[in-house]
Image (cartoon, coloured by chain):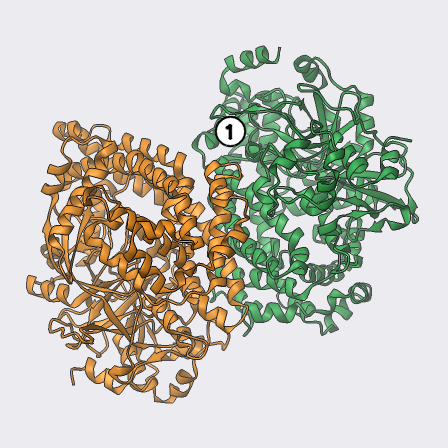
Chain colours: A orange, B green
Amino acid sequence: MRQKLRAAAAALGILALIATPASSEEGMWTFDNFPAERMQREMGWAPDQAWRDRVMAGTARLPGCSASNVSGQGLVLTNHHCVISCVTALSTTQANYIEHGFMARARAEERRCPNMNIDVLQGITDVTQNIETATAGAASETFARIRDAEVARLERECSAGATRCEVVTLYQGGRYSLHRYQRYNDVRLVFAPEHGMAAFGGDPDNFNFPRYDIDFSFLRLYENDAPAATPNHLTMRFSPVEENEIVLIAGNPGRTSRLRTTAELAFERDHNLPWQIASLSEIRGRLIAYSSLGPDQARIASSALQGVENSFKGLSGRRQALADAAGFARVAERQADLQTRVRRNRASQREVGDAWGEIEAAQTAYRGMFYPYQYLEARAGERSLLFSWARDIVRGSAERGRPDAERLPRYTESRLAAVEQGLRAQRPVTPAFEEIHLAFWLSKMREYLTVDDPIARRILGDESPEALGARLSRSRLADPAYRLELWQDGEAAVAASDDPMIQFVRAWDADARAVRARYVAEVEGPAARAHERIARARFRAFGEGQYPDATFSPRISYGRVIGWTEPNGRVVAPFTRTAGLYERATGQHPFVLSQRWIDARPRLDPNAIFNLSSSNDVIGGNSGSPLLDREGRVVGAVFDGNIHSLGGEYFYDGNLNRSVTVASTAIRTSLADVYDMPGLLAELEGR
Amino acid sequence: MRQKLRAAAAALGILALIATPASSEEGMWTFDNFPAERMQREMGWAPDQAWRDRVMAGTARLPGCSASNVSGQGLVLTNHHCVISCVTALSTTQANYIEHGFMARARAEERRCPNMNIDVLQGITDVTQNIETATAGAASETFARIRDAEVARLERECSAGATRCEVVTLYQGGRYSLHRYQRYNDVRLVFAPEHGMAAFGGDPDNFNFPRYDIDFSFLRLYENDAPAATPNHLTMRFSPVEENEIVLIAGNPGRTSRLRTTAELAFERDHNLPWQIASLSEIRGRLIAYSSLGPDQARIASSALQGVENSFKGLSGRRQALADAAGFARVAERQADLQTRVRRNRASQREVGDAWGEIEAAQTAYRGMFYPYQYLEARAGERSLLFSWARDIVRGSAERGRPDAERLPRYTESRLAAVEQGLRAQRPVTPAFEEIHLAFWLSKMREYLTVDDPIARRILGDESPEALGARLSRSRLADPAYRLELWQDGEAAVAASDDPMIQFVRAWDADARAVRARYVAEVEGPAARAHERIARARFRAFGEGQYPDATFSPRISYGRVIGWTEPNGRVVAPFTRTAGLYERATGQHPFVLSQRWIDARPRLDPNAIFNLSSSNDVIGGNSGSPLLDREGRVVGAVFDGNIHSLGGEYFYDGNLNRSVTVASTAIRTSLADVYDMPGLLAELEGR
């Protein structure tokens, strides 16, 4: 059946294929626009509204990741790599949970994660009309500011207490949705395996399959210092999934660029990605060198290093997808098809005007301010906790005194609580580690802005990047009490602070704000205004049966448990099994079994499914998403895509793109036979 | 006059401009095909044959660089960055010549550089006919092998004693020249300033101008343990050059790709350069981290780090030049123009056939073996001395037993002496530093070949890249006596060696040789065969008045002392002056003045020319070249190009490309007023 549909679709030719997704599994659909009929037609089954409502209520979002709620007492399943910064923060030389794992066998042992919060979607409201009304007639230079003011108003009026609202731009501006979340701020770590087992195979195996990772962890939601009651939870199924079984993934894919223009993607390919890849490579080298200094350094760096290596591999794959002539042709053809359709429709043509040309002009403007925008604003102080706190304190204290509509988006009324939570977080600061990130950023800032740039000179003064980084790394902001004191005392206290990081951030904040304002007026606004018109034309041409680009908001994708065939003919089966883990272990990093897994071997079923591949369309941010069966039961935690899925930022290829999941069978055997967690297992089994 | 000529040329349109170089200063000309008439016409003066012969005899080549002979007692002027590996090798914790400089005030204090040799060109013979006869009728798969066998024969028959001959491929295969050099193996360090002064401004200022570097050093050629008599030396002129003065540069530009096809350059842009840039960035990060561990580590890493940073910046500029749509269009237009001319000429068309298509096919084949070829062969063990010695010992001892025509090119009879010299060199080995390079290479090898690649598995065995790198770094090959013992005892001794690095290299040498053979048969041969035909068509279309791509062989370029105007309108003057050095010094690395320069300030002329910019067409390899006035006197040592010259790999833009020179005035004041080297100065002044 699927084969026939594919063949029929293929016969229509590539341009026609763009009208509906090319592969039946393509799409990261919003909960309020799920293509149930299409799925029913293609897969022979589709979830009904009740199923979708239940799943929406049982899934969750955490910083950068996805999760599911799997017990009535607030238990949450996600990936280990989604909680690694929490595990790092809770670890010390004496209690190294990165190396040895974390296992709370009683509620009292569960440990609060600093700076972790979990959002559960409560409802979606279309607010396109509000935004359109507010921005009607706005010039492209002021568009983004006016839009953001309306966003701030909508979010403020909707948010209250634990209800946190967020306006999401969909279809690159074709729709705006107000998402209403319940936010949990007290999230505690329940279970995390050893990092070496969660990330078995490390960077070499990342985005590869066959794979043998137990990349899962459990958290618990707390309210009023007690486990939250979560009656809308999902349940886990521990019986193995079958090959070809229909599976769905509900999670928060972070970002795709499938609706962006060729000018934007050429900029990505030729400028942004190469620059980012080079930056990531160098900081990777610095972090590897730091890690090799000893076990403490390795523990402190592990979360950052894993993040950097993951980004490097992901962005390299994306660059490759665009550098590939056939890859870029797909993008160009998609745009040419829409342009052809626009030309055939006079109303559409009038409305769109030269939107593509305007976006190209915005990219040209961006190129002229790219490095200042990145180094002074968007990525200033990247990976330095001290810098991020200082900027929040300096900016937040200034912004709070302004009307909501005039504030920087991060500091609008409805978002202030999140900023404050970040400042409160008890996160350990290692000055030597901060110094690495600060010196790296400052040296690259000087390299790309050049030594003679007046702002670069103002930032560095007479200091070298290394000396300045070292001085700033001794900021008192490592102490949360001092952070909160400044935050609460406000602008005058901040101005009077003698802390080097506070003084440093203040000294050139006006420069950073200026380049931000230029970016918003000359790049973001004009591009958004033009995208809005393109999006309208796209709806006119293709109707409502489309999915928007990923925006780190809740989505569902559907597919099957299935392997794939490599272009060279090699067939990759959809399952790996426990025995394979032991075969792959060399005893050398990153292929080292923990003692627990060595000891457990006789107790384990060598044929149990470990990891699996499925054809669902996912992308980074989906990490930790539940893999769901037709009954809505959780049969695993999605933790990766295969190497072909990296191009998924730009297109989905049903023959090759695959998501990768740690199977519930592996989760069960881990808890039962390796880590001796009967209580946790009983809770999962509803016993 | 120049303006008029330029305007006239511009009026011919861009395609016609390709027939002769677009800018009058374009071209790195061979000594036997210098465009004297053209230069006379354009510049109003040109050097005659005697001038060119004198300059050829007075200039020299050293590893990766250029130089001039500036006294009758073998004194050689080059850049500090051309001798930095010698300075590093001679330095110790106690005698840190990197930090403090090296000043031999008597002959007896001059110190031999390990692994340094200097070649002085004696004559050029066209051997195109020999190669063509030898390769007539050869299939493209065997072409490179047959060509290399003939090259080996020509070089062997010409070389003897200190005469070392080299066949150079010019015009990407349109011509072959036999270069006869006199080789000096005993080269001693005479003078090197502090690294911080030679490279003042460090990486941030590299390829930038205005600039304030005293990037020069002096070496001396020795024969029979005494200074070599060098009657054909050039002389220095210490009076300042004038703006617009005609200047020539004689040196050895390393490589350009101006005659390569769009398929080859697209491969560079999309695959090779991005991969190299990422690799360089990561090793840069690792080296920066190592350097920061202490002054010894900084000294040990300085040469490698400077090389890595220089390559990073250079390759990034090249990638940018190709990623720029206008840049790539220049390349594409050049090719399209030639193709148009070929189509108009039936003989040409018949001869060329589908040469461009064949090269594209070779690139596709290359892509399929790119990472194995790089990691197993071309860049295996990159930057590890121990690895390079082991490979020379393992391969050399095997190759010596074969007829010359069947050997790998590096080990043919005429080249063996150079290999042996490398093995003899007294170069200090720091195991921890070796370990960095070995672990880096092995980890990237595994990353790019993937963990499951059978050769990657064979290379690593059960070890991690880090553990294996650490084990190999303890090889006995650090001892030159052991290296020579193995080299002299030959294959059986090598096979019996229990040294870990020797055993390691032997274990998978067959794999490396196999991928090399595939590369030679499927990429190098077919591309060379096709390029030969394109080159013939190019001669047919444009005649002999062309310059070949740079091939690290002696060339002359001409130009004027001149600044430039940035695209944003900023005018850059051609000179910097001593006062500017002091203004630029912040006291923070890399803008730190040495105590000697601080002390000397009152003695110096603030208006003396320090560095200068000229319009000569140069590229990496030209470093250390003499800048020559019309009388053939040395008025400086070229040490860099400006940022626009990075695209010079692919095209020369007369409005923007500039070479950068440390002026003889700065050299003189350094020796006279800063470093107190009256003897050296007297020698330079012929007193």
The answer to whether any part of residue B263 appears in the image is no
Which residue is pictured at 47% across the width and 32% down the height? B328
The answer to whether any part of residue B386 appears in the image is yes
> In the picture provided, is B538 more to the left or to the right than A343?
right
Tally the numbered discs: 1
For badge 1, the amino acid type reads: Gln
Q: Which residue is mark 1?
A: B335
Q: Nearer the viewer, residue A508 or B319?
A: A508
Farthest-out residue, bottom: A602
Q: Nearer the viewer, residue B576 or A218?
A: B576
Q: Is residue B639 above or below residue A43?
A: above
Subunit ID for the residue under disc 1: B
Which residue is pictured at 43% across the width and 32% down the height? B325
The location of residue A565, given as percent across then percent down, is 34, 60
Which quadrant of the rendered structure holds the C terminus of chain A?
A: bottom left
Which quadrant of the rendered structure holds the N terminus of chain A?
A: bottom left
Q: Is residue B367 above or below residue B432?
A: above
The location of residue B71, given as percent across then percent down, is 87, 34
Question: Dot 1: few (<14), some (14–19), or many (≥20) neighbours within 10 Å?
Answer: many
> In the picture provided, is B435 more to the left or to the right than A492?
right
Q: Nearer the viewer, residue B30 or B245?
A: B245
The location of residue A444, given as percent across then percent down, is 49, 47
> In the picture provided, is A43 more to the left or to the right than B356?
left
Quadrant in the rendering for residue B617: top right
| Label 1: which secondary element | helix
> In the picture provided, is B245 more to the left or to the right than B634?
left
Quadrant in the rendering for residue B151: top right
The location of residue A538, given as percent across then percent down, is 17, 39
